[in-house]
Image (spheres, rainbow, N blue to C red):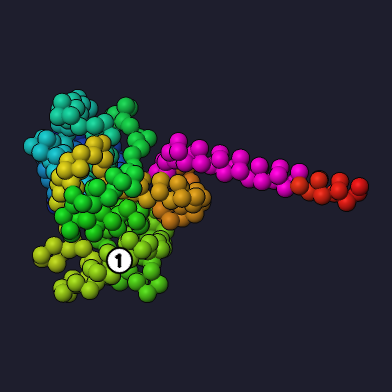
Amino acid sequence: MGLYKRGLVWWMRFTYKGQQVRKSTETTDKKLAEKIYYKVVNQIAERKWFDVDEGNKRTFAELAEKYETQVFRELKSWRCSISYLNQLKGFFGKYKLNEITPALIDDFKQMRKKQGVKPATINRQFKILRRMLNLARNRWQWIKETPIVEMEQNADTKRVRHLSFEEFNKLLNCCESWLRDIVIIAAWTGLRKGNILNLKWNQVDLLSRVILLNGEETKNKEDLRIPIASHAYHVLEVTMKKNDSKSPYVFYDNNGIPFKAGRIQLNFKKALKCVEIEDFRFHDLRHCFASWHRQSGVDLDTLAELMGHKDTRMTRRYAHITPVHLRKAVDLLEKSYSEYSTNLAQSNVAMATQTA
């Protein structure tokens, strides 16, 4: 048994994470000390015990490093979120984990607001922060409790924005050639930025004109089969013919590796500024894909399938019908009814003539 005495008090000795640990039971009663000792041993076996000193020793910078190497880079969208993680490290990095309180988290929120950051962006950062702290408690046992991370209530979760064909063509004219190809693929396939940047040739079937993603590469964990429209097909065909590298990726830099999300964002913003398009981001190209299809008459169920949505509620957020297209829909109904009324009247006249 790992119990021994120091003076009148019983101490316990055990192994935790490969290290010898000595802790006082804070009792002189041997039977009570035995109960405390066996409780700790069982908690360690069930991964429910942690060293209370860990939170005072570990810094957020250490947590960020562990999260980035063991968890973050395994996520499909990590390239798009790396800037969020870096900003969290910049603010919280020097603090011990037990020093990260709701008040300190609120200080970060207020700082970001003063920098003009939108509530929705702050919430995306807070989702990462919340997950990191939960892992620190549940997986690595570095902290006993997680501080409350209060999300922004005024975040615009229903933000809608898409381009007309005219705006889209002007945007393409302001893009560098390599970015232009990526923008076309985004708008005509509806793929997310992470999927495009990591797209490989073995996922592209030009003969069948489809892009195939398995469940490990999609947000909803289900296989996705996207027909390749003519505009996207032309880009992929030309890109394949120009491919003089052994890189398996469709879009890559001079080193044969996928373009960084930061580079895409920077150059995309320059193109938007050039064409004077405001309040638009790269992900909104996915809104363009959805809206253009809806305005062309594609039903929600089919569109949900194309976009990899499990139901049409999310699809409705992406697909925006303009007043002009709503008017056309009403006109189509009126036209159908008018044709029916005309045919009915002609039929009645014909029947009356035959009777006479």
Find residue 265 and report its horizontal and vertical position in percent.
18, 47
Query: In this rendering, does residue 53 appear at all?
Result: no
* Residue drawn at x 45%, y 36% as measured from the top left: 323
* Residue drawn at x 51%, y 41% as measured from the top left: 328
297 or 73: nearer the viewer: 297
* Residue drawn at x 16%, y 55% as measured from the top left: 176
Q: Is 47 on the left-hand or right-hand side of 294?
A: left
Residue 226 position (above or below residue 293)? below
Find residue 92 and report its horizontal and vertical position in percent.
13, 36
Q: Main secondary structure of the magenta part?
A: helix
Query: What element does badge 1 sit on?
Result: helix
Query: In this rendering, does residue 353 appear at all?
Result: yes
Q: Which residues are magenta?
A: 317-345
Q: What residue did someone put label 1 on?
A: 234
**Residue 134 is a magenta residue:** no
**Residue 339 is a magenta residue:** yes
Q: Is 209 on the left-hand or right-hand side of 263?
A: right
